[in-house]
Image (cartoon, helix red, strand yellow):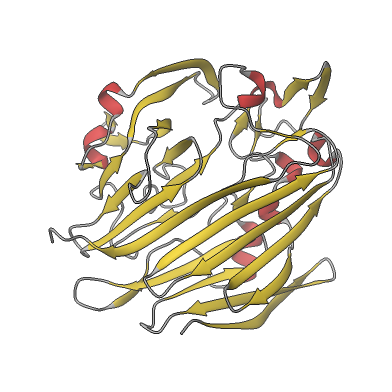
């Protein structure tokens, strides 16, 4: 049986912030907070049955308020970068916050990571709700958003994103969780990774897509260590920040599988999104302490007609999901 509890965690701008725990009968659990609709912890057993937290996080609200790496946060309205911090839709140019080398990254001041969401707790899970107002951060439309967290008896974290708008706009929400299947006892570069993708986006030096979709080539992952794909600069590994175009597949075929030989844990990622950003956490306070597997629409898609559309029209409903299935690597 799934149990859900909450406790007051702090206050921000006159609003209460809560830490919510969802636990299954195995004793595995997740903790989430309505600050940023953030994933705080995922506690699961290793191959010896020892429980441990497999995502990066902070022990208090202040840690998240001071964080600049989006640790565990829900990202929106539009995840990743929009080049030049602007896009044109129906002949109207929309100027956004330029917060990353002249580009808009993770929506700037409109970013969900620093918003306090409303909470609706039900037997099946927790729904966080937010109204992102028209022209906040430069984005058009009043966007009503729901982020739904569910934790199953089988240790699967199911995250769903639902949104509606009163004006034509663009939307791409994702989870910026950083995973470490060894619970932080080591970095993640020896984790083994498989990504079901044969193509990726070409990018400029500022990580904005050029518009070209190219073969994954040397950056393909098929049961290979993250370390083996890293360039070495001055005897130090250089991180990976690549957007993969996911192959079309049917459930239960995962988009991505992450495994640790040390702990025996395995994570399978399932999603309705067309792509996934792999970020190895090289700009974290402790580089490579966690790896982000950000399922989302293509970055800068409002500026590239050859990319899948991230446009949301009034009367339509945006609905995407990312499921994280935790278990054991059968080969360990």
Taking the spot 43% from the left edge, 80% from the top edge, the residue there is 24
Image vertical order of residue 31 relative to residue 218, above or below: below
Q: Residue 324: in sight, yes or no?
A: yes
Taking the spot 68% from the left edge, 34% from the top edge, the residue there is 99
Query: Residue 45's x, y, as percent?
Result: 29, 74
Query: Residue 167's x, y, as percent?
Result: 84, 36
Report the side of 273 relative to 49 (left or right): right
Taking the spot 31% from the left edge, 60% from the top edge, the residue there is 181
Image vertical order of residue 124 relative to residue 255, above or below: below
- Specify the quadrant that holds the C terminus: bottom left
Query: Residue 257's x, y, as percent?
Result: 30, 49
Q: Judge by depth and name the residue closer to the eye, 213 or 206.
A: 213
User: Which of the 4 quarters of the picture holds residue 280?
Assistant: top left
Q: Judge by depth and name the residue closer to the eye, 10 or 219.
A: 219
Report the side of 220 relative to 319 (left or right): left
Query: Residue 305's x, y, as percent?
Result: 62, 17
Count how many numbered circles sit on residues in the image: 0
Report the side of 194 relative to 133 (left or right): left
Q: Residue 175: in sight, yes or no?
A: no
User: Which of the 4 quarters of the picture holds residue 328?
Assistant: bottom left
Image vertical order of residue 198 relative to residue 323, above or below: above
């Amino acid at each position: 049986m799934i149990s859900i509890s909450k406790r007051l965690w702090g206050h921000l701008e006159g609003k209460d912030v809560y830490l919510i725990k969802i636990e299954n009968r195995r004793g595995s659990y997740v903790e989430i907070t309505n600050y940023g609709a953030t994933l705080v912890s995922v506690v699961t057993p290793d191959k010896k049955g020892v429980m441990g937290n497999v995502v990066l996080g902070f022990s208090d609200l202040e840690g998240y308020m001071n964080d600049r790496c989006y640790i565990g946060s829900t990202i929106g309205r539009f995840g990743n970068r929009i080049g030049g911090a602007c896009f044109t839709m129906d002949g109207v140019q929309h100027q956004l916050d330029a917060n990353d080398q002249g580009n808009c990254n993770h929506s700037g001041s409109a970013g969900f990571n620093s918003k306090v969401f409303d909470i609706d707790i039900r037997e099946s899970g927790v729904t966080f709700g937010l109204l992102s107002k028209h022209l906040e951060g430069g984005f058009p439309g009043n966007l009503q958003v729901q982020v739904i967290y569910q934790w199953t008896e089988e240790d699967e974290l199911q995250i769903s994103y639902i949104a509606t708008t009163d004006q034509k706009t663009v939307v791409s929400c994702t989870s910026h969780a950083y995973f470490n299947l060894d619970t932080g006892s080591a970095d993640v570069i020896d984790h083994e990774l498989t990504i079901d993708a044969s193509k990726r986006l070409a990018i400029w030096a500022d990580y904005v897509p050029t518009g070209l979709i190219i073969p994954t080539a040397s950056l393909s992952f098929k049961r290979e260590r993250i370390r083996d794909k890293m360039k070495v600069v001055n005897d130090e590994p250089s991180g990976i920040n690549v957007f993969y175009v996911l192959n079309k597949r049917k459930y239960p075929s995962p988009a991505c599988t992450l495994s640790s030989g040390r702990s025996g844990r395995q994570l399978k990622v399932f999603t309705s999104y067309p792509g996934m950003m792999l970020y190895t956490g090289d700009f974290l306070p402790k580089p490579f302490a966690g790896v982000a597997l950000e399922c989302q629409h293509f970055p800068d898609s409002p500026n590239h007609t050859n990319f899948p559309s991230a446009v949301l029209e009034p009367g339509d409903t945006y609905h995407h999901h990312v499921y994280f299935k935790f278990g054991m690597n059968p080969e360990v």
